[in-house]
Image: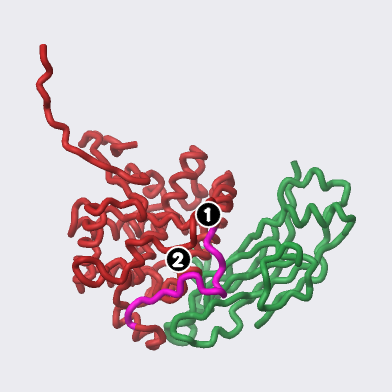
Chain colours: A red, B green
Amino acid sequence: MAVGSPTAQAPATPIGFRRDAARLTPGQLAIIRRAFRAVQGLGDDRGYAHHSGIHGLPLPIGCDNAHGTEYFLPWHRAYLYFFERALRDREPDAMLPWWDWRVGFGRPAELPPPFAEPNDELGPNPLFDAEVSPLALQQGGNAVPPRTRRRAGHPAAPPLPSAAEVVDVLSIRDFTGFSEQIEGLHDRVHMWVGGHMGQIPYAAFDPIFWAHHCMIDRLWRVWQLEHPGATPPAAILDEALPPFRMTVRQTLSVTELGYDYAVSTASAPATPTPVPA
Amino acid sequence: MTAYRIDRIDLPAAELVDEVTRADLVFYGVDHSGVSYEGQVYIDASDAEPPTTRDPSRGYAGSFTVFGHAGCYGDDGHCLPGQGFRDEFDRRPRHPLTPFTRTVVVTDRVRSAMSSGATQISVTVVASVPPPEGGEEPGEPMRIESVRLLTYHG
C-alpha cells in the first residue's frame, strides 16, 4: 500500500517506506545519517539519549512490561514510531532502515555495512556507536563503557536466526504463539550483537537496535498480511503502551501510522511531456 | 553454571505417534532478572553440560533465550515481584520481573522417542552465557519453576 488510510478530514497521502539497510542508495543513507547525527546532538527530550533511555536505563525501564508478554510487538512498534518521528523532525525524509539478519542461502552473519563502518565521509559514523547517557551509566554503577560497543558473533552467543526459522515462525497462526516465538528470535539477535545490545538497560543506545527492531516490526507486518484478521488478544487491544500515547489497537495498522516496508525504493519527478496530436 | 535436569516426562502412547503434529516443551516461571542467556535444551542427554554443542545426534532439541534485565538498579525491593499492596481494583501492570514462559518446539525429537517405544523422556537445560559488557561475573542466571510437554494431535 503506497498511501495511508484517508479520513473525513484528509485524503489519502503518500506514506514513508522503511528500506533494507543493506540496499540504501547513497542519498538515502546520507539522510538517515544526518538525522541520527542531529538527534545525537540534542540533549533534551527530542534527543537520542532521551529516546534510547526509554527502553532501559535511566529508570524507569520503559520496556519492562514489553518483554515476555503480548505487548512485545505493539510496544516496540510504538517505540519505533515515536523515535522515527523525532528523526523526521530533523530530516523530514528520514525513515528507519531494517537489518535483514537472516542467515542461510548464502547470506552471511554480519552487521549491515552502514552500521558497521566506524567512520563516514563526515567523521564518526552516527550509526556505528553512540554515547550512553551519564544518568544511565550512574544508575548502572558505571558497569559498562560510556560509548556503545559490540561483540558481534561471539562464540558463546547463539547464532543469528536462519531464513528457515523465520518461515516457521511466520506460519504460526495465533498472535500469542507468533509473538512468543518471534521474541525468541529477537533475543538471539540481541545476544549475537552482544556488548551493550546484549543487556536490556543499555541496548537501545546502540544504533543497530533500531534497525534490528525494524526487522522485527517488518516481520509482524508480513505476518499480519499472511494472517489477515489475526490480532493480539481482545483483552489488551485498548490498553495503553506507556510511556507512549498509543493503545495496542492503534499500532495494528502500519499504514495508518504512515509507513510501510520495502526492500528498496527509487523516486523521480514526473515531468509533463507534450504528446504530438 | 547450573543445568536443569528433569528425569522423567511421560510421552503419549507410542501408537499415537502418527497423530502428533506438534510437540512443545513449555518452561514456566523463567526468571529474567539476571544477565541474558541461551537455555540449550537436550532430550535424553542427561550428561549435557557446558560447553555444549548443537548436535542433534547428542540430544540437542533447540533453545530458548532470555534477554535479561541484568540486575536491579533501584532501592531495596525494587526488583522483587510480590512486594506492595494489590487488590482486585489494582489496574497497574504486573511487576515487570514476574517470571515468564518460554516454549521450544520439539516435534521431531518427541516423535522419534515415541517411535522408539519410549514411554518417557528426560530433559536437560544448559545455560550458555555470552560475556556481558563490563566483564562482571554472570553468576547463575537461569531459574525455572517447571516444565510441561504439550503435544497436539491432528
Q: Nearer the viewer, residue B72 or A203?
A: A203
Tell me if residue A153 is in the magenta stretch. yes
Q: How many discs appear?
A: 2
Q: Nearer the viewer, residue A215 or A78?
A: A215
Horizontal side of B100 relative to A153 (left or right) equals right
Q: Residue at x 51, y 42 (%)?
A: A230
Q: Main secondary structure of the magenta part?
A: loop
Q: What is the residue that sits farthest to the top in this orientation?
A: A277
Q: Which residue is mark 2?
A: B92
Q: Which residue is mark 1?
A: A179
Which x, y percent locates residue A119?
27, 70
Whether residue A61 appears in this view of the structure is: no
Q: Residue at x 55, y 65 (%)?
A: A159
Q: Mark 2 and mark 1: span between their CA atoms?
A: 22 Å
Tell me if residue A139 is in the magenta stretch. no
Horizontal side of A196 relative to A129 (left or right) equals right
Identity, as a three-letter code, of the amino acid under mark 1: Ser
Q: Residue at x 80, y 54 (%)?
A: B112
Q: Which region shows up in magenta?
A: A146-161
Q: Nearer the viewer, residue A57 or B94?
A: A57
Horizontal side of B133 relative to A157 (left or right) equals left
